[in-house]
Amino acid sequence: MLEINNLHASVVDIENSEILKGINLKVNKGEVHAIMGPNGSGKSTLANVLMGRPDYEVTAGSVVFYGESILGLRADERAHRGMFLAFQYPAEIPGVRPWQFLKAALDSKAESRGEDKMSVRAFSKLFDEKVEAVGINPTLVKRSLNEGFSGGEKKRNEMLQLEVLQPSLAILDETDSGLDVDALRIVAEGVNSMRSPERSFIVVTHYQRLLNYITPDVVHILVKGKIVRTGGPDLALEVEKDGYKEYLAAAGANA
Amino acid sequence: MTLATLPAAVEKFSTAYESLLTRSSNTTGWLNVLRQQAWSTFSELGIPTKRRGNELWKYTNLQPLAAADFVYGVSGSVTRDQIKVAGPWDDAWNTIVVVDGKFNAELSNLNGTAGLNAGSLAEAIAGGTGDVELQLASLAGREEYAFTALNTAFIDDGAYVAVIDGTELKEPIHVVFVTSNATENRASYPRLLVDAGAGTSLVLIETYLNLAETAQFVAPVVEMFAGERSTIKHYRVQMENEKSFHLGTTRISQLGDSDFTSTSFAVGASIARNDIHTLLNAPGASCTLHGLYMTNGTQQQDQEISTTHAKPNCSSNQYYKGILSGKSHAVFSGKVVVERNAQKSDATQKDLNLMLSRGAEIDAKPSLEIYADDVTASHGATAGHVDRDTLFYLQSRGVSEDAAKAILVRGFAEEMLNEFKPTALNEFVERITDERIPILLAESDTIGTT
């Protein structure tokens, strides 16, 4: 489904700002990959580069999604092909209601595929079902997008979007940061309920605790812009116990 | 007083003034005195210029207005359908139509509502209706201000609205000032007097439409008297054509425990000013002044918003939002004066601007002048743009770039659009906004920058 080869990326317009220094990663259909690493390792950058954030510039390598190179595509075009990014800090957007914005998202997708737009009635039904499924307060989704939402509410709203948009690849960018255990459970339930043989996840996290609730198929350790180790779910537990010191020291020696 | 020569900018209006005096059927004695005094004031002041060091016009250059010529007294024809297409309309509303400054009974739609006396200002003056002689020009027209003086010098007709004590009107009153189509550049001086009695409740919509394609000079003056315990919801919709000049003045005097809310929608004209002042003239009065302005091209759009707390225990709230694109220019000049004995006053001021282009300019000057010591007041102004993170967030969900920009601009306006409560009016301002956004975006160069 997703193949990343020798991916290098820098911050746009800043010299010597390379953050990703040769990432190789293959995600098959239905797999959940966890990407773990210390602060500044490039985890978040990887998540954002995959989604096409314009703040980063890919300087080498390739990203192929369902057989198509996506590096030349805008974020909305990547979304139309089935990618989704759950944000660490979702933007607060005054005056824009989640309903309205998700309808616009689905409309854009339908338009790009030459399909008919969903009727307002059909969309409302879908939206209401998902609101109930995610357990988000219905009065909240009538308000401005994320404006005045608590940390937990914002994440629940991200899960609502995930449910409505039904992507084939969902990337979670440190979705667990700043969450209490209850909110963590919400995110985990959202992900677990959506796991299917047709859908893959990349879960980017600093801590192992989210992985208590979401059992990954593959765990990668990312340090200084490179994946330094790949293993099974047990690798996450090992990191929890020993931290990233060993990897940092090794990466430092290689630098 | 004899002037050897009138300033050129005044001279141009004097022929029109002479012709008004000979032509007007309105020969009421006190009105003639009022006009003469106002003409004399205007003759001395002329059209304001920056050169005079006038703080009120520091950011607004009226040279294009001063340089233009306008004819006066040429009235064209307008149909009901034209009005319905160009502005908000609801058959249930009590609609007064004023064409080129003159009340038009045929186009008006007065439903004979009990407790409401609405119609021609000329008739109210001639008939000495209510307190018209006392009220007219008591809030605007006798002071040293060029545009209220000019309007007052040319009072001939307009609209008169009186709501008798205790009346709670179910349907809005809609006053449509429409400029008919014409090849000439014309001047008109719409006038509206509103007398809301004690304990009344009403919605008043004031709409300026322009069916001409040539430059029109429209200088309206509105005076409103809010009786004790009255509740007035006022809306002002300014839709002049892009060549025109609109210099509007609204003056409100509020009695005890009255509540006045005004929401303005200003999108039209080449140079426009919405000058509104509320006088909180008895304890317990409150006012809320809101507005949305949108500018593009080389438009100039001013909000000159002021409130005077003359008595204790009054509250005021000024909150405006602007969306600016192209090389347009807007001014928010908000002023709150709290007089010495106006203790326990509560005043807030806010002006937020969304700058869609680098070439656009906003001059925001919120100011408080407080002479009492027990007052709660706050003020603030911002100018920001849509940042890249927000745009990326929407795009990452699959919303196309253009749609995302439109959603974000619309989102900024939404809060003010929601203030327009009557359904047909709300639909109208939403439609105009949705039509306007792509035009604003076409001249935008700041969206998605960091």
Image (cartoon, coloured by chain):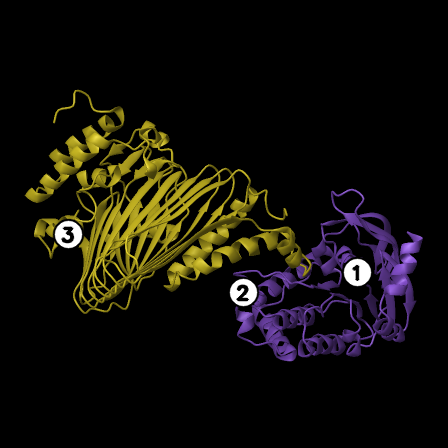
Q: Which residue is mark 3?
A: B135
- The purple chain is A
Query: Image point 71% across, 68% down: which residue?
Result: A175
Helix, strand or loop status at disc 2: loop
Q: Residues within 10 Å of mark 2 (few under 14, many from 20)?
A: many
Q: Which residue is mark 1?
A: A43
Quadrant in which the N terminus of chain A appears: bottom right
Q: What is the CA distance from the residue labelled 1 to the residue labelled 2?
A: 30 Å
Residue B90 spot, x, y in % from top left:
34, 61
Disc on res. A144: 2
Q: Is residue B329 left or right of residue A90?
A: left
Helix, strand or loop status at disc 3: helix
Chain B, chosen colour in render: yellow
Helix, strand or loop status at disc 1: helix
Q: Amino acid at mark 2?
A: Ser
Q: Is residue A155 left or right of residue B424?
A: right
Q: Is residue B12 above or below residue B233?
A: above
- Which numbered mark, 1 or 2, is in the foreground of this view? 1
Q: Residues within 10 Å of mark 3 (few under 14, many from 20)?
A: some
Q: Residues within 10 Å of mark 1 (few under 14, many from 20)?
A: many
Specify the quadrant of the image occupied by residue A241. Answer: bottom right
Q: Is residue B47 above or below residue B193?
A: above
